[in-house]
Image: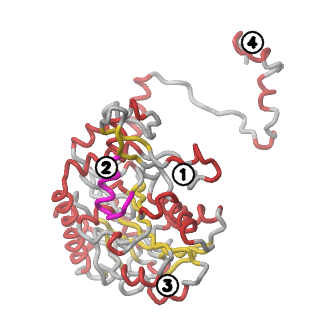
Amino acid sequence: MALSECSLEMLQYLKLKSVEELFSDIPPSVRTGGLRLPDGLTELELTRELEAMMSVNRTASQQPTFLGAGVYHHFIPAAVKTIVMRSEFITSYTPYQPEISQGMLQALFEYQSFMTELTGMDVVNCSMYDASSALGEAVLMSHRISGGSKFLISRAVSPEKKLVARTYARGADIQLTEVGYDPATGSVDINDLKSKLDPDVSGFYYESPNFLGLIEPQADEIRSLLGTKTMVVGVNPMALALIRPPADHDADIVIGDAQVFGSAMNLGGPMIGLFGCKMDHVRKMPGRLIGLTVDADNRRSYCMTLQTREQNIRRGKATSNICTNEALLAVASAAYLSVVGKSGLRDIAVKNVEHAYLLANRIGALKGFRAPHFKGTHFNEFVVTSDIDPKRIHEDLLSKGIHGGFPLGKDFPELKNSVLYATTEMHTKGDHDRLVNALEAVR
């Protein structure tokens, strides 16, 4: 291929004879031979091609979806979308210059304030990447607080969260050990927890509601067993509109995902990790913190605070490698909570609980189905067990324009014929009817 005059000039400047010399350090055995890209398209042609590709997709608004497992379909008021589309807020990063970023900083401060009110914790940072990275950071922070080379984690936790937590722990030589759940109630197996607590354990992580949809009823007993060890609690923050906050159980660290507040499912991301702790531990926590102060003229102002914990200042001694946050989604969460209000959030949470119990009872009444699988208090998810292959059920539901739940057998072999179903305020009675009728027809 003939080189342009500009390319020849660049090669001459670099003292190279050919373009191939640029790649001389790459072994021939791993070279790809170049990218075989199609010819370029005009904007109109590209638009038509993308529309054709997307036409085969079916969105959650076009078919009922009962897939939760950490990402949930909730209504997002139009005002929230309008606010986050404003040019002042469209950034994924925390502003370093407070003198020109007061609006964004205040929005992030409001997000922190909302989250502290919901969780009851003394301090909440202005977000992590997602709940999984928040858990990984909590494992490391627990080690900083309590010492020890072991950390216990409930088995009733998302498999993705556990994988991320293990990745974080491996780099710090921390051993992660699972604590089982009660096969009847789905709650933490207290006897198993007791048997695995030893002086080298730094802390324990459980969720309420957990991955199987159940509210943990033994929080106070867990706190008593742990003593001075770190108690880390995972939450669905929407459920906190109804249940006691983790701070009431003396939690040291709280994590979760605020995607439920104003962020769409978006094929699984981006998410927004919630991370809070006691004030005693604030200098050991990761992530950005926005504080309230006054300027030179004694006017209320906002700024990043306690930055000496962070990587860009403290380098290798920082509390975390995370030096950013999900700023735009934090703004969305603050906007969502401002729009729906305290009573509105409670009403939404109540609908989630009502829908879960109504749907679980209807499915449980079908021949060959058991729902809910566990005897406990659920929020908006529950496990359904059947003697029918979950894969077959899923494919049959898809053929009827319904997206089913999350098959549990791969990650929980003891629940090989079980599926986790989620239902929110977005589902109507008609959506439930379609699912129940479709399940009844599967034989």
Q: Which mark is in front, 2 or 4?
A: 2
The amino acid pointed to by label 2 is Ser
Disc marking residue 193 = 3
> Badge 4, how many Cα within 10 Å: few under 14, some, many 20+?
few
How far apart marks 1 and 4 lie (CA) works out to 48 Å
How far apart marks 2 and 1 lie (CA) works out to 25 Å
Assign a secondary structure to mark 1.
helix
Magenta stretch in the rendered image? 109-123
* Figure check: 238 above or below 262: below
401 or 286: nearer the viewer: 286
How far apart marks 3 and 2 lie (CA) works out to 35 Å
Disc marking residue 309 = 1
Q: Which mark is in front, 1 or 4?
A: 1
Q: Is residue 112 magenta?
A: yes
Colour basis: secondary structure
Q: Position of residue 338 (x, y in %)?
A: 22, 48
| First in sequence: mark 3 vs mark 2 | 3
How far apart marks 3 and 4 lie (CA) works out to 69 Å
Residue at 41 percent across and 67 percent down: it is 234
Describe residue 301's horizontal placement relative to residue 279 as left or right: left
Pointers 3 and 2 in contact (CB under 8 A)? Answer: no
How far apart marks 3 and 1 lie (CA) works out to 33 Å
Q: Position of residue 226 (x, y in %)?
A: 47, 81
| First in sequence: mark 2 vs mark 1 | 1
* Figure check: 198 above or below 175: below
Q: Is residue 379 magenta?
A: no
Q: Which mark is in front, 3 or 1?
A: 1
**Location of mark 2 (residue):** 333
Q: Quadrant of the C terminus?
A: bottom left
| First in sequence: mark 2 vs mark 4 | 4
Residue at 47 percent across and 81 percent down: it is 227
The amino acid pointed to by label 1 is Arg
